[in-house]
Image (cartoon, rainbow, N blue to C red):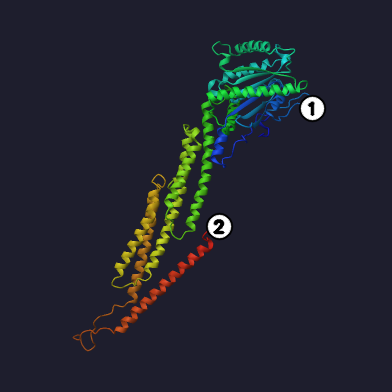
Amino acid sequence: MLVTETQLVLEDGTFQAWSAPFSTDGGEAAADEDAAAAQPFLVFAIVGCQGSGKSTLANELFGLHFPVLDAARTGRQRTTEGIWIAGRQRDGAQPALVVLDVEGTDSRERGAAGRGFESRTTLFTLSVADVVVLNMWVHDVGRPRGANYGLLTTVFSETRRLGDGNRLNRRPRLVLALRDYDADEHNLSELSALLTDDILRLWREATDTAAERFHDFFELDFSAVPSKIFQPEAFRRACAALYEREVAACLARLGARPKTIRLEALSVVMEATWAQLDENLSAGRQADGPPIALMEDMAAYYYCERIRHAVQRDGQQRLHELRLLLVSSYEPPRDFGERLLEVYRSAAKEYRWRARHYKTAKAAETKRQELERWLCAPEGGQLSQLFREYVGLTFRYFAARFDDDFATVLGGTQDFERRAAAMRRTCLDAFDAAVAQPAAVATEEVLPGADRIVQSERKRLERQIAEAIDERQRHGEAMLPALQTYGDVATGPSRRRSKPAWWKVFLIRAAILYLNYLQAKAQGNSLQKARRRREKDLPIGPTF
């Protein structure tokens, strides 16, 4: 799959954010995203003098379409400005490729004032590239001013600034592509030997010390590339062979020492590297890039942040389903605790799996704790909020059940207190049992504030029950007069009080029962209306 070429660094040095489009998005399946992010990748950089054909070589090597010089139409002028970037995903088991086309050196437009920009782009290239391809014309070999020796001197000087701690690849391959090579006129072995001597001499001049050996910093390779105009088929075959040889060499090295930076975080690392170089050069400090350890931490932070967002997005869907279940339920679901625990375990397992490559990084633990707080914080945690809604539903359900059962109890009677106390105890025991199961299944680690939520709603239920009992007692006592079993006669206190007429007692009790019946019926009708309204708004069954 070809990725559109884009400008990574503008002519004025502005860095433009770039992401690897051939890697998957955080919202896709975890396995696919992880496979894409974990795939091996190589960074190739093409450098050379302005107008030397480096962009043409890059296009042929990797099947890209970087802008190239059209001298007949525009004249010999700078074509590549800043740094261009493109990605290429080859078929099969081939690694993903990131290709950098770096602005040519010795340009008329930049002139002598552009040395700082050349140093910055060279440092950047050496910081991130696995392979640096130096485009060189074969007829310039042996001519110091025409063979890109000035660029080699810049490369070697800047390499010393970086050291082992500032490169993604501690020993990049330096490939000299000898353009317009003709086997009838040239001998690759002789050219390689001559160039090797010149390169080692330039290295000694740049380092000025025998302790720093060239081969400790670079792997050197040479490639003969015939003329694109006069030998187009041979040019294509040579480019294909160059590509296969360099990729194979890099893959062998990746097997021995895998990269610690993953593909998805490469853009963040490149941006941080360019910003560090720009800051140091602007301040007149040593123009080295950020240490590799810092880049690894940044990559881990970036990738683990993406994982956390993806896991939260998946968790939001499960939480939404549970919330719909609560809203559509009249009584509390029996397996709600298991469902809460499953949401927590699923999120924790998914995060651990997808962040396993960064498990030793501090950022991985930081983002895991952020995910856990999002789920389990006593105030504002998603699971805590959902458990609070569950306990609220449980409160409403048992409060309504108590009202239904208590509606037929006659206040003011001899057994009123006994019956009311029994109903109160039954209701509270049922409430405790209903909320104890989810709180027990979802451990204290998952629901740290569960006891406080339960106690708050239980006290509310106790108050509501106590108020209902007191109100019924007052109504009953008001409607049932204190009938005297015996009364004094009007003629004298010696007369015994007479019993009230039986039919008066009967009528009073019947009136009280009838009023209690009306009250219970009104409460029942109110509950039925609320239930029908809920079923109308949220019908049972799938809603789509």
Q: Position of residue 119 (x, y in %)?
A: 63, 22
Name the residue furthest left.
494
Q: Secondary structure at mark 2?
A: loop
Q: Amino acid at mark 2?
A: Thr
Q: Please identify the quadrant where the N terminus is shown.
A: top right
Judge left or right: residue 247 versus residue 350. Answer: right
Is residue 117 in view from this perspective? no
**Which percent across, then down, holds residue 460?**
38, 59
In the image, residue 375 above or below residue 207: below
Q: Determine the image quadrant of residue 203.
A: top right
Query: Which of the numbered marks, if any, corresponds to residue 543?
Result: 2
Q: Residue at x 51, y 52 (%)?
A: 321
Q: Quadrant of the C terminus?
A: bottom right
Callout 1 secondary element: helix
C-alpha separation, residue under disc 2 versus residue under disc 1: 64 Å
Q: Which mark is residue 74?
A: 1
Looking at the image, residue 46 lies above or below residue 317: above
Q: Residue at x 43, y 72 (%)?
A: 521
- Return the x and y of residue 366 as percentages of the image width and height: 47, 37
**Does residue 196 appear in the picture of this structure?**
yes
Relative depth, front residue between 431 and 333: 333
At label 1, which amino acid type do we have?
Answer: Thr
- Furthest toward the right, the residue is 72
Q: Quadrant of residue 116?
A: top right
